[in-house]
Image: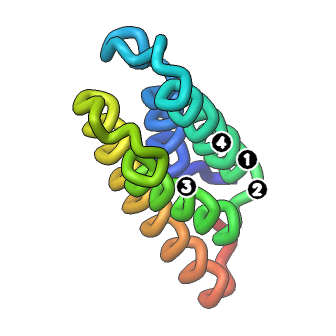
Amino acid sequence: MKTHWENWTNIVLGVWLVAPTWELQYAHMSLVAWNSYLAGFAVTIIAAAALTSPSAKKEMTNMGLGVWLMASPWLLETHHHVAATANTFSVGILVFLVASFAAYQESMHRVAGSPR
């Protein structure tokens, strides 16, 4: 089974959401930190699962998480922390774009009938 860069990229992005909470000094802000931890773990787990069993549904789930990451600073009213907002929003854009491309690729492979 061939693995693709999209899933590895989203794994790295998911880990990135968790790792810099201390570096960007928002580990002590519970709501901001928990949002990063939970979304980061979810993106990582879904992308890892897509490595072993590719599916457009998994990629669409990560697309949804990307949208959540872009909107969450305002929905959770934590946008006042600029570093956390910038990190969460920019990672959300990247997760969404990478997962969108992977979902497109997966659907094209499925339509063409070729194994991934």
Q: CA distance from mark 4 to mark 3?
A: 8 Å
Q: Secondary structure at mark 4?
A: helix
Q: CA distance from mark 4 to mark 1?
A: 11 Å
| Relative image position of residue 51 (x, y in whole percent) | 67, 48
- Nearer mark to the viewer, of 2 and 4: 4
**Disc 2: CA contacts within 10 A as few (<14), some (14-19) or many (>=20):** few
Q: Residue at x 53, y 30 (%)?
A: 31
Q: Earlier in the sequence, mark 4 or mark 3?
A: 4
Q: Residue at x 68, y 61 (%)?
A: 58
State if disc 4 and disc 2 touch (CB < 8 Å).
no
Residue linked to disc 3: 65
Q: Which mark is residue 53?
A: 2
| Relative image position of residue 89 (x, y in whole percent) | 33, 47
**Disc 4: CA contacts within 10 A as few (<14), some (14-19) or many (>=20):** some
Q: CA distance from mark 1 to mark 3?
A: 15 Å
- Nearer mark to the viewer, of 2 and 3: 3
- Nearer mark to the viewer, of 1 and 3: 3
Judge left or right: residue 88 versus residue 6. Answer: left
Q: CA distance from mark 1 to mark 2?
A: 6 Å
Q: Amino acid at mark 4?
A: Ala
Residue linked to disc 4: 42
* Picture quadrant where residue 64 is located: bottom right
State if disc 3 and disc 4 touch (CB < 8 Å).
yes
